[in-house]
Structure formats: C-alpha cells, structure tokens
Image (tube, grey):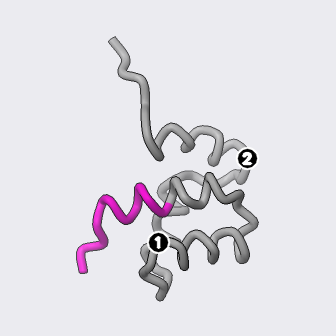
Amino acid sequence: MTATVKGPASYFPSIEKKYGRPIAEWKDLIRSSPLTKHMELVNWLKTEHNLGHGHANALVAHTLAEGTGG
C-alpha cells in the first residue's frame, strides 16, 4: 500500500530531475541562507538558482514547515 504524496513534497521528484540536485541539498541551502521570510527565500531561489516559482515555493514551504531548530 503506497500513499499518494501530497502538498509541497509532490514536487520533489520533478525538482530533482529538472535541477539535478537532491532535495536534501536544496533544503540545506535554504537553511543556510541568511534570509528567513518565505517569499524572500522563494525569490532568492528563483534569482540565484533559476528555480521556477512553484518549485521554489514548494521547497521553501516544506523546509520551513520542518523548522530550522532556531
């Protein structure tokens, strides 16, 4: 029995395929950024790493939902 992945994580396979980096690497980048606000991080990923808006938004939403420990 496999559960259908929903929400931001549903984008992860296509993000890895399109940009050639594992999700853990993207999350590490987000966590190490001095930026903390959702849209600042989304815009940073779009500008600095050429991610599409939906992919950047999904990564940031999922990473921030996990918490950063600080």
Q: Quadrant of residue 69?
A: bottom left
Numbered disc total: 2
Looking at the image, which is closer to me, 58 or 27?
Answer: 58
Q: Which dot marks residue 18?
A: 2
The residue lying at 69 percent from left, 69 percent from top is 46
**41 w.r.t. 52: above or below:** below
Q: Quadrant of residue 42?
A: bottom right
The residue lying at 46 percent from left, 79 percent from top is 32
Q: Residue furthest front?
A: 39
Q: Nearer the viewer, mark 2 or mark 1?
A: 1
**23 w.r.t. 2: above or below:** below
Residue type beneath disc 2: Lys
User: Residue 60's spot in the image, x, y percent?
Assistant: 48, 63
User: Residue 64's spot in the image, x, y percent?
Assistant: 37, 65
Compute the Cα span from label 2 to label 1.
22 Å
User: Residue 23's spot in the image, x, y percent?
Assistant: 52, 53
Q: Which dot marks residue 1?
A: none
Q: Which residue is mark 1?
A: 38
The residue lying at 44 percent from left, 41 percent from top is 7
Q: Which residues fall within the magenta stretch?
A: 60-70
Label 2 SS: helix
For the C terminus, the image quarter is: bottom left
User: Residue 38's spot in the image, x, y percent?
Assistant: 47, 72
Mark 2 nearby-residue class (10 Å; few <14, some 14–19, many ≥20): few
Mark 1 nearby-residue class (10 Å; few <14, some 14–19, many ≥20): some
**1 w.r.t. 36: above or below:** above
Q: Residue furthest top?
A: 1
